Every structure is written in C-alpha cells, then in structure tokens.
C-alpha cells in the first residue's frame, strides 16, 4: 500500500491530473522564492490570528516569528495563514456567536491547505476553544500556542487588571462612589499591555485547560504576552510541531477521555470560568466524547480550589507564572490526575510532571491540605427550573446567598433589563432573585455574557454588593456573585424559564445542587399553553445557520452538524 501523501503533496487541488496539480502548486509557491529543498520538508501550518481588532493577540508578529524559528531549527517549513480572530469587545452581538464560525474556518483551512502539523496561536476567550474544536475535527497533529496574559497596571498605587477590576470600578462608579475623572483614569490603567485578561477569566482558564489537555508544550499556559518566556515557548512550540509531524502523536491520541478528565479537574482546581465547561463540552463533542455534568459535579466535591487568582482569590496570571505556573498546580493535583494521558510532547502528563522537578516555595498555588476553597469552583444545579442543568461558580458566590429562597423579579430580555434595572420604581429588595430570560444560545442569539446582571442602582446605592441572579446566559470568567447561569433548556426554546413570572418563589440550594421554581407542574403547563414560545429564526446568512443548528449549553453550544458522528466515550469515565 502506498504511503499517504505528505508535505506539499497533501490535499492537491483537483484538476483531474495529480502530477499537474503538484507541478502547478510548486510553480505558484516558487513565485514566493522557495527552493525545492525548502519545499521537500515537513510543512507546518501556523494559524495566525493577528488582527488590529484583537489586542489580546497584539504580540502575534513576535510569536509567529519565534514559531517559524523553532520550525526551521527542527528542519520543517513554516507556512503561516490567517483565520478569523475574535475579541470579546469587538464582536457584536457577542463573541460566542462567532466561536463556531472561527472553528469552521480553522477546520476547513487546516484541511484545505497542505500541512503535516499545525500550530494554533490563540489567546482571547473564544479563540483557543474555536481552534481546538477546529483542529479536533480536522484530525491532523496539532499544538496550541497561547498568546499570554497582559501585564497588570496601577491606579493610584493600587494594582489593577482586566477584567475583574473593570467590573469592580464600574460598580463603584454606578454606586456613585467615584466620579467621572477617576473612572477615566482607571480606564487607562486596566489593560497595561497587549495580551489576554490578567485574572482567571475565560482566557486564562482556557490556557490552563489547553495545557491540562496535553495540547501545549509544558509551561505553555502562563507566561505573560510580553515576556521572553512567552517567546521561548513559541520557539519550542514550533520545534515540537515538527516532531509531531514526523512521529506524532496525532490529536486523537491526545484528546482522549483521560485528557478531558484532567482538563475538568484543572478547571475546578483553578476556580476557572464557567465558560470553560461549555467550551470543553464542545471540544470533546468534536472527538465524540460526552462531558458528564453529574460526573463533573462529583469531581467538584473532591477537588478543592488551589489557585489564588482573582476573581476567586487575590493574584494575577503573572504571579501564577512566577509561582511556576501549571507545573506547580499539576504537581499538587497529581493524586487526582489521570497520569497516563498522552501530551503533544509524546510523553504522558505523569512523565511531564516528573520532569518539572520538585517545585519551590510560593504563595499562589495552595496545597491540597490548605485550599482557597474546599470544593471545586463550579457546581452543577438541577431542578424544575433547569431540567437540563445549570451552573453556579460557588467560589465566586456570597456564602450567605447559596441557600436562599426569594421572590422572582423578572426581566423578559436584555432590552427590558436595560430599560428598568436602574429605575427607582423597580420593585426589588436585596432578598429577591433577579431572573433574566432570552439570553441563551438562540435567545440573544449567541448566549452573551449578560448573566452578570447588575445590582439595581437603588440597591447598589444602599451598599448591596450581591443578590441571587438566574439566567440562561453566560457570565464573563472575570465576574463574581451568586449567579446561576446556563439554565437549560433556555427560555427561547420554551424551557421552564420562559414561564417564570414576577412574584414566583425560587429556591436556590447549592448544598442540594437545586434550582427550583416553586410553582406546580400544572400551573407551568397552563402558562405554557396560554403563551406558547415561538423559537427565533433568521431569513438568511450565518444568523440562519446559527439559529437552525446551535445546540443548548449542555451540548457545548456547538452546531449539531459539527459534532463527531459517533460517541466514543465520556469524561469523567
Ligand atoms: Fe481578550 Fe479578555 S478580552 S482575553
């Protein structure tokens, strides 16, 4: 049997004559000055997501240069190519709406262009999951390079960073504790350099998760964007990509149920973003692996939060890096990890932990015996309000509110919220439960990070800092509060959330993992019959595709046709 084509001979454009197709391809690429010697080497694609609209990827030129150096030193041929880049603040209506489009772009360009392995460079929240989803589906050897976190800034001698401090200062401004001049000063300091958000938000979460999955070189998660360490990681990543092209392992040997179990374990131990669950579910789905929410919740009861980073703790990503980064965390978590999981280095996670050495004294990663929070950061809730599950980040919640029953104050959608939340006439007390509908996958659409419902201004003025909030949306990983998210099924497809009314009683019990609407089934059925929900549709374009194909939060908000056709396992196993 003849060997599968490699390098430039892969995936020839079809002109009906393979020899001619290769002849033509070489002629064109030689137009860029390449020699036959260069073109005979393993071809390593580099997914370049640099964009003026994406300052989280602002170090892309330096990273691409270093990756190319690593590839050339290891004997490969680097070929960078652009894909969609998605930044949180420059993606209307919401970046999540575009994650699947970016994953399709990545998958199809990796498949369409000849490459023996691919380096995926991403960092901002949706880019790493989109790239991992795309590469998982494309099926060639792949390695993730993270752009790295931004540096922290200083506001009047106080250390600040995006975006937990963005929210904190905006809250102070809303509560009229600081004036226009000070909020403008803060605005200059929150993002002190290019790179991703400096707290344990979604970007940092996905960086740690990517390393836990075995998809980065060891130490790839934590170096800040503008450091020499980050550039060295980029060079190593390029060199490793050439080894991947020559001898594997393929992505199917890395993204296994054991790897996803490790990623979930790390997600819990870092007090990671709730978005991490949605993204991991989507990436796993591309490999035919189901994330078992009940199993995740069981893991949560055995996994303490160890990493002391905002918003659950006090430090920033650059401190985590100085404390040894993921090596320090993985060493501590070792008894709870699947050490046999393979990584892109060709060594197992257990072997990489051994190679990382004994560690040193530091105060960012706690020990299992002295955690930040005794249980995992995330808990999975169920009940008649969320038959398909809901999520709460308990490590960022107010302990006084985690067992709470209150009166529902309902907002029908984001516009309704914006119109009424700050009005003095809003009938609300600190004991109520704010409910926001129609910000789920189809509702908004794209499941925006609007689940962090602001404290009504009349309560904020009296010093109220937290209130129970419930929605079918997501929340930024940098936010905090007693906030129930991802209520499934969402209101826009007729989930029970659609039929909650002002004055209904809702019970939240994190201890019992319950989110209950204290309204009878018969009454809910009567409301559903009286006000049937019409699912949103669109007439054309990506919006039409999105609304037809997007799945609910428990399926990763991926498109149904992008999931692997067959299930091959689940995580945790
Ligand atoms: Fe890009 Fe926060 S906006 S990581």
Image (cartoon, rainbow, N blue to C red):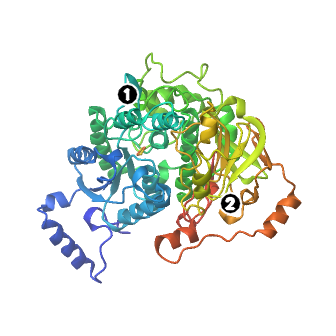
Residue for badge 1: 155
Task: Give the position of the N terminus as an image quadrant.
Answer: bottom left
How far apart marks 1 and 2 lie (CA) works out to 41 Å
Foreground disc of the pair 1, 2: 1
Q: Decide if residue 4 is on the left or right side of residue 559.
A: left
Residue 573, can we see it?
no
Instruction: Respond yes or no on whether mark 2 lies under 8 Å from ligand 1.
Output: no
Measuring from the top left, give residue 53's x and y in whole percent: 33, 53
Q: Which mark is residue 203?
A: none
Residue 65 visible in image: yes
- The number of discs equals 2
Residue sitting nearer the eye, 116 or 455: 455
> Which residue position holds label 2?
491
Residue 198 is situated, as x and y percent measured from the top left of the image, at: 41, 35
Ligand 1 image-quadrant field = top left
Mark 1 residue element: strand
Identify the secondary structure beneath mark 2. helix
């Amino acid at each position: 049997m003849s060997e599968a084509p490699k390098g430039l001979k892969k995936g020839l454009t079809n002109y009906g004559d393979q020899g001619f197709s290769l002849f033509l391809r070489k002629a064109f690429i030689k137009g860029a000055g390449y020699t036959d010697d260069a073109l005979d080497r393993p071809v390593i694609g580099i997914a370049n997501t640099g964009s003026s609209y994406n300052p989280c990827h602002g170090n892309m030129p330096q990273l691409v240069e270093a990756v190319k150096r690593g590839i050339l030193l290891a004997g490969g041929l680097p070929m960078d190519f652009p894909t969609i880049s998605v930044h949180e603040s420059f993606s209307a209506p919401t970046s999540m709406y575009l994650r699947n489009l970016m994953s399709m772009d990545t998958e199809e360009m990796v498949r369409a262009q000849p490459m023996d392995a691919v380096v995926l460079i991403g960092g901002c929240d949706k880019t790493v999951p989109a790239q991992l989803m795309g590469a998982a589906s494309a099926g060639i050897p792949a390695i993730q390079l993270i752009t790295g976190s931004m540096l922290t800034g200083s506001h009047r001698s106080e250390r600040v960073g995006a975006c937990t401090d963005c929210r904190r200062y905006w809250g102070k401004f809303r509560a009229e504790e600081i004036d226009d001049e000070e909020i403008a000063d803060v605005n200059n300091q929150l993002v002190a350099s290019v790179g991703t958000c400096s707290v344990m938000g979604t970007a940092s979460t996905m960086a740690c998760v990517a390393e836990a999955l075995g998809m980065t070189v060891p130490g790839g998660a934590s170096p800040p964007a503008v450091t020499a360490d980050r550039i060295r990681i980029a060079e190593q990543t390029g060199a490793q990509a050439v080894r991947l092209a020559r001898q594997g392992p393929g992505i199917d040997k890395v993204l296994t149920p054991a790897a996803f179990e490790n990623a979930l374990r790390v997600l819990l131990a870092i007090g990671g973003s709730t978005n991490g669950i949605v993204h991991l579910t989507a990436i796993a789905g591309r490999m035919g692996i189901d994330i078992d929410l009940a199993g995740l919740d069981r893991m949560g009861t055995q996994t303490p939060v160890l990493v002391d980073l905002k918003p659950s703790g006090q430090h920033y990503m650059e401190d985590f890096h100085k404390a040894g980064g993921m090596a320090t965390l993985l060493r501590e978590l070792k008894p709870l990890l699947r050490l046999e999981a393979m990584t892109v280095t060709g060594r197992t996670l257990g072997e990489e932990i051994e190679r990382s050495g004994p560690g040193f004294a530091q105060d960012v990663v706690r020990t299992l015996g002295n955690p930040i929070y005794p249980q995992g950061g995330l808990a999975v809730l169920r009940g008649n309000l969320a038959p398909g599950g809901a999520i709460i980040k308990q490590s960022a919640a107010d302990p006084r509110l985690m067992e709470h029953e209150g009166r529902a104050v309902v907002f029908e959608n984001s516009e309704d919220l914006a119109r009424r939340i700050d009005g003095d006439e809003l009938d609300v007390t600190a004991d109520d439960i704010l409910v926001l509908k129609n910000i789920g996958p189809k509702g908004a659409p794209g499941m925006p990070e609007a689940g962090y419902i602001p404290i009504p201004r009349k309560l904020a003025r009296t010093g109220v800092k937290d209130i129970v909030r419930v929605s079918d949306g997501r929340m930024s990983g940098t936010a905090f509060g007693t906030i129930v998210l991802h209520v499934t099924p969402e209101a826009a497809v007729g989930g029970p959330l659609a039929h909650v009314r002002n004055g209904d009683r809702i019970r939240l019990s994190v201890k019992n993992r319950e989110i209950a609407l204290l309204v009878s089934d018969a009454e809910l059925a009567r409301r559903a019959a009286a006000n049937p929900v019409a699912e949103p549709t669109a007439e054309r374009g990506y919006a039409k595709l999105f609304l037809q194909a997007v799945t609910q939060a428990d399926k990763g908000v991926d498109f149904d046709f992008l999931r692997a056709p067959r299930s091959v396992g689940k995580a945790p196993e």
